[in-house]
Image (tube, rainbow, N blue to C red):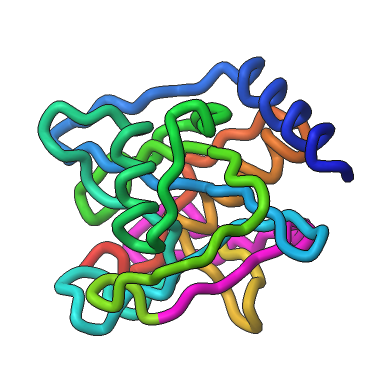
Amino acid sequence: MPAGQLHRRISEALASFPRRAADPDGRKPAAVLIAIAESAGEHGIWLTERAPSLRAHAGQLALPGGKLDPGEDPQTAALRELHEELGILLPHSAILGLLDDYPTRSGYVMTPVVAWVGETPPLSPNPAEVAEVHWIPLTDLDVDPQFVPVPGSDRPAIQLPLLGGHLHAPTAAILHQFREVALRHRPTRVAHMEQPRFAWE
């Protein structure tokens, strides 16, 4: 799909989606960024593999993001984190919209922000935060989610078959909603979808 048409479709889908905010309920606000870029005529997003030296969730796959600094909104935090993690500086005008908040087992309320990058700029991954960067074409998100039981919960966890393995929630839940809402124009909720046991601990 041409870039202009894709940009318009995603913008319209997010604008018409009745996004749900979550009550923090003691959790810390955080934001993640789904940054849509184009490389060799193909649109996709980046997932980062978290550096092994990080205190929390080292080695896990994640969208660029982190907790909000004092006075920040999710949009500002998501753009800041993209710059800090991958060296990409985007203006606020690049933001296309937001998806539902996702409360995590690790004590955060994550707000997914969707932004348009355009042609892929040079990446400068921060080695203190990022061990590896993975390019995920949008077509690779067109997979059937899997739902598996989680000990200690009456809710199944969502998994997406990606990168030769399985991507887990919260990232899997957020990307599933992005596909359904932004790419397929199908209102879909994911906040009820469980995370794997290791995300609890």
144 left or right of 31 in image = right
Q: Is 201 positioned to the left or the right of 133 in the image?
A: left
Q: Nearer the viewer, residue 16 or 105?
A: 16
Name the image quarter holding the N terminus. Answer: top right
**Image quadrant occupied by the C terminus:** bottom left
Residue at 55%, 66% (x, y): give it.
Answer: 148
Residue 22, picture quadrant: top left
**Left or right: 9 with respect to 182?**
right
Q: Quadrant of residue 60?
A: bottom left
Residue lying at 37% horizontally and 81% vertically, measured from the top left: 131
Residue 50 in the image: above or below residue 110: below
- 157 or 44: nearer the viewer: 44
Residue 87 location (% of width, % of height):
38, 60
Residue 84, given in percent of the width and then of the height, sits at: 29, 57
What residue is at 40 percent from the left and 34 percent from the top? Answer: 101
Q: Is residue 56 magenta?
A: no
Q: Position of residue 32 (x, y in %)?
A: 40, 47
**Residue sitting farthest toward the front:** 122
Magenta span: 132-158
Q: Is residue 150 magenta?
A: yes
What is the residue that sits farthest to the right in this orientation?
1
For the image shown, how many numbered marks are present on the structure?
Answer: 0
Seen in the picture, residue 171 relative to 124 is either above or below; the reply is: above
